[in-house]
Image: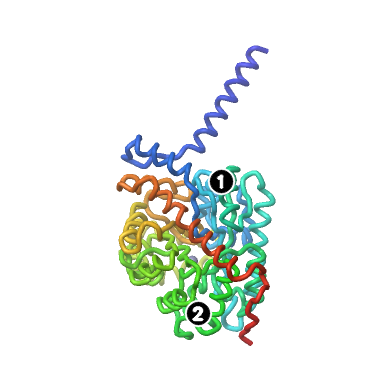
Amino acid sequence: MKNKLISLLLLSTFIFLLIGQTFAQIMPKNADPKLWQRALAIHKKAIIIDGHNDIPSPMYDEDFDLATNSKDKFHLDGDPFHTDLQRLKQSGITGEFFSIYVSRTYAENGGSGAARRALDLIDVVYRAVEKHPNQLIMCRTADEIRKAKKQNKICALIGIEGGHAIEDSLFALRDFYRLGIRYMTLTHNNTNNWADAHRDEPRNNGLSDFGKEVVREMNRLGMLVDISHVSVKTMSDVLDVSTAPIIASHSGARGVADHTRNVPDEILKRIAKNDGVVMVNFYPSFLDERTNNEENERSKRLKPQIDTLKEKYKDDKQAYNEAERKLFAENPIYMPSYTRIVDHIDHIKKIAGIDYVGIGSDYDGIPFLPQGMNGMEDLPLVTYEMLRRGYSEQDILKVLGGNFMRAFAQAEKVAKINSRKVSGEGSLRKIK
Ligand SMILES: [Zn+2]
């Protein structure tokens, strides 16, 4: 009996240690242990909002359950998983924007079903929250985010990526708001019928008249306008029209890496005046021009081999993915450190000010992360790097989520001034 008790005690100690181990953050190499502990303490205290996470797509397409351990696992398209419940917990995030990403294929070449795709993805997020009520909660307002933080729960926030999801209907836009959508990225990489994208034919000279109506209606509802993925002219038009703060949910600074997905300095300055936030993307090709150039060059160089692999494994997607990963591993490209994320934060701070920068990881939407980062669990590294560079605690709290919270609350205020009803005096304009 005594032996049994002792072994039970040993077993429970072991389990306790194991759990402790799982939730412990791994200190970066050569880090100052004292500073690391301080970073973790600030991180724990902060309201942390991540502007963009693409996990809803595999949740729908692959039936991925957030409770599954996703470490070292890959999506059907071959990209690595960065997100699961435990990793969300380890990241310290208070509110995660689950991206309702609608591919351009739903809008082009006679494509249809963009709004239906968005509805399906919204449902999988609600389903996940219902399935894991002790860890997750749906949040629609800044107040709900604060409340969730007190309850030690993670907010599931939802934003639409790709304005074609509303199928040119302000009626649908209002319905998406009713379902909890709190930002909309006006375009994905494709120009739609009312807004021009960053790397597509401009057809609207930025925002068309209807596009401006979409922005006004979003202001009236309290849905944040997101300028990630749009052209510079569209960014500028949005800033001319919007009466509420806007966001770039997952974009860096062009002043650090000259990529069309990043925000140029002149727009950064205007976002400061608009009281908006630019939330820095973690994708190495947006963080660093060298990575982008080498990635493009590698794609061109390896195209014949990739085509051969595609033909060879046309009936076995998994085998193809493995072969492609092996080929890429044999042909490595330059990979910046996670500290490059803070180079972008530094630049936005310099040009716009510390009050207008945030984080928008793009986890589960990108094929690789910067060196030192394997997934969401490594988010405290960003806090550590800011601390190491001498950022004050107050400034770090702003970047991690304080700035987003201010912009979000202000957008809610603008909506309340404009109208108290969702239908209200809402516009009835349509593109026929
Ligand atoms: Zn995106």
Label placed on residue 149:
1
Marks 2 and 1, how far apart at CA: 36 Å
Q: Is residue 16 left or right of residue 284?
A: right
In front here: 154 or 215? 215
Q: Quadrant of the N terminus?
A: top right
- Count the marks: 2
**Residue 82 appears anywhere in the view:** yes
Say few, some or many: other residues with alpha carbon within 10 Å of mark 2 (under 14 / 14 to 19 / 20 or more). Answer: many
* Residue 300 location (% of width, % of height): 37, 72
Among the two numbered marks 2 and 1 on one chain, the one whose residue lies closer to the N terminus: 1
Q: Is residue 40 above or below residue 181?
A: above
Image spot of residue 64 (x, y percent): 62, 55
Query: Residue 242 got which mark?
Result: none
- Residue 262 position by quadrant: bottom left
Element type at mark 2: loop
Q: Position of residue 416 (x, y in %)?
A: 60, 65
What amino acid type is highlighted by mark number 2?
Answer: Ala
Looking at numbered disc 1 in the image, what kind of residue is underneath it?
Lys
Q: Quadrant of the C terminus?
A: bottom right
Q: Is residue 175 left or right of residue 392?
A: right
Classify 10 Å Cα crowding around label 1: few (below 14), some (14-19), many (20 and above). some
> In the image, which is nearer the foreground, mark 2 or mark 1?
1
